[in-house]
Amino acid sequence: MTLYDILATHAPRASSYLEVGTYAGGSLGAVIQANRRIDALCCDNWHKPREDGQPGGPGPVRELARSLGHRGTLRFLEGDSAQVLVSLAETFDLTLVDGNHREMAALADLRLVWPRTRSVMLVHDAERPSVQLAMQAFMAEQAPGSLDFESGLGRRATAIFRRRVS
Ligand SMILES: C[S@@+](CC[C@H](N)C(=O)[O-])C[C@H]1O[C@@H](n2cnc3c(N)ncnc32)[C@H](O)[C@@H]1O
């Protein structure tokens, strides 16, 4: 299954969504199409130039959401995730980590996003060695039995972390 398929599977059961790495809104669009009422918070520094030459940023993403009939709230955290997520005092049913894929940056995102995840955290490009190392280090820090993990398959794999409820 692709990331978008996996998001579409989980989004209907979620009322709130946080994503790190929004880019042009592809993953957000998949979430909205599966749940138009979801409240979303998108974090990106928009340093990556868009392939279509259009300017990145909240404006075009907001326009995309509107065109898809989004009826929930849509907010943005602009900047480096390691800085802007630290002071975020909210939790979300569903989260996605798809920002900087270097090992230490991905590990920082996992450490910031998991405590803000109520149910399911997805990690894209999970087959990359850098992301694998980050996930291993992250899992070694978690209390035994506190989560379930599915590694995902193949190229552009999506790993799934589910919080266990006791
Ligand atoms: C692979 S793209 C995200 C793709 C998107 N999730 C989708 O499926 O359409 C990665 C995004 O992460 C952003 N990014 C990279 N490093 C970041 C950081 N340190 N903080 C916030 N965003 C970052 C880039 O600007 C880029 O837009």
Image (tube, rainbow, N blue to C red):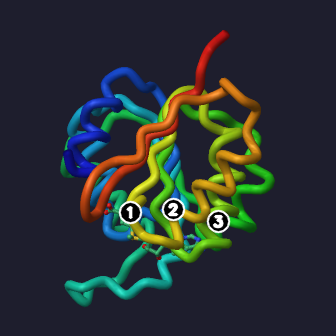
Q: Contact, CB < 8 Å: mark 1 with mark 2?
A: yes
Q: Residues within 10 Å of mark 3 (few under 14, many from 20)?
A: many
Chain-order first, disc 3 or disc 1: 3
Determine which residue is flagged by label 2.
132
Indicate left or right for 142 with 34 as reference: right
Chain-order first, disc 1 or disc 2: 1
| Residue located 55% across and 60% down the image | 43
Which mark's residue is nearer the viewer, 3 or 1? Answer: 1
Q: Secondary structure at mark 3?
A: helix
Instruction: For marks 3 and 1, give the CA distance.
Output: 21 Å
Chain-order first, disc 3 or disc 2: 3
**Residue type at tag 1:** Glu
Indicate left or right for 115 with 52 as reference: right
| Residue located 49% across and 36% down the image | 149
Q: Residues within 10 Å of mark 2 (few under 14, many from 20)?
A: some
Instruction: For marks 1 and 2, give the CA distance.
Output: 6 Å
| Residue located 66% across and 24% down the image | 145
Using the image as rendered, state which of residue 113 and residue 144 is in the foreground.
144
Q: Is mark 3 within 8 Å of ligand 1?
A: yes
Q: Is mark 2 within 8 Å of ligand 1?
A: no
Q: Which mark is residue 81?
A: 3
**Residue type at tag 2:** Gln
Indicate left or right for 102 with 158 as reference: right
Determine which residue is flagged by label 1.
127
Compared with 149, 43 (above or below) is below
Regarding residue 45, the answer to whether it shows in the image is yes
Instruction: For marks 3 and 2, give the CA distance.
Output: 19 Å
**Residue type at tag 3:** Ser
Q: Quadrant of the N terminus?
A: top left
Residue 83 in percent (x, y) is at 75, 67
